[in-house]
Amino acid sequence: MGIVWHGRYAGYFEDGRVALGHKYGISYSDFIRYRNPVPIRQISIEYIEPLFFEDDIEIETILHWTEAAKINFEYIIRKNGNNVCAGYTVQLMLDENLELLLAPPPFYLDFMEKWKKGLLA
């Protein structure tokens, strides 16, 4: 059919999360280094228009503020300036024993403080 498989969109979301995380020091590698895994708890994908193989796309990734020990991302995938997919993920923050954290780990609190002060570019 030449269209992108529906399951691939979750991978596009991950591409956006990875890029944002590397930019701000909250990547998967950072969480693993501090022994705080962040598994996906929830994912939602709204398909608006199909993507075709070799389409050029833009992935907008938005991190939503929360003081809870979780990460809420929103995604918009665009082709030629038009929205073709939207969605969100929720990731939980765990400790090294895979127990749910009740508050974000210290390195993420540092990130949040920079965010509140408008120090992120």
Image (cartoon, grey):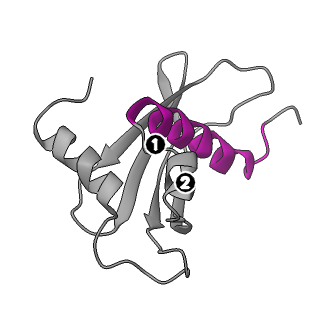
Residue 24 or residue 62, whichever sits in front: 24
Label 1 crowding class (10 Å Cα cut-off): few <14, some 14-19, many 20+?
Answer: many
x, y percent for residue 80: 54, 15
x, y percent for residue 66: 24, 60
Q: Is residue 85 visible?
A: no
Q: How many marks?
A: 2
Assign a secondary structure to mark 2. helix
List the single residue furthest toward the right: 1
Sequence order check, earlier mark of 1 and 2:
2
Q: Is residue 62 left or right of residue 35?
A: left
Label 2 crowding class (10 Å Cα cut-off): few <14, some 14-19, many 20+?
Answer: few
Q: Residue at (49%, 65%) from the top-left corner?
A: 36
Q: Is residue 28 left or right of residue 106?
A: right
Q: Amino acid at mark 1?
A: Tyr
Residue 61 or residue 97, whichever sits in front: 97
Q: Is residue 86 left or right of residue 117?
A: right
In reply to whether residue 5 is colored magenta, the answer given is yes
84 shown above or below 99? above
36 shown above or below 114? below
Please give the residue where the numbered disc 2 appears in the rendered image.
Answer: 33
- Closer mark to the observer between disc 1 and disc 2: 2
Residue 101 or residue 59, whichever sits in front: 101
x, y percent for residue 3: 80, 35
32 shown above or below 97? above
Q: CA distance from mark 1 to mark 2?
A: 26 Å
- Which is the main secondary structure of the residues drawn in magenta? helix
Please give the residue where the numbered disc 1 appears in the rendered image.
Answer: 75
* Residue 97 position by quadrant: bottom right
34 shown above or below 119? below
Image: magenta residue range = 4-24
Picture quarter with the N terminus = top right
Q: Amino acid at mark 2?
A: Arg
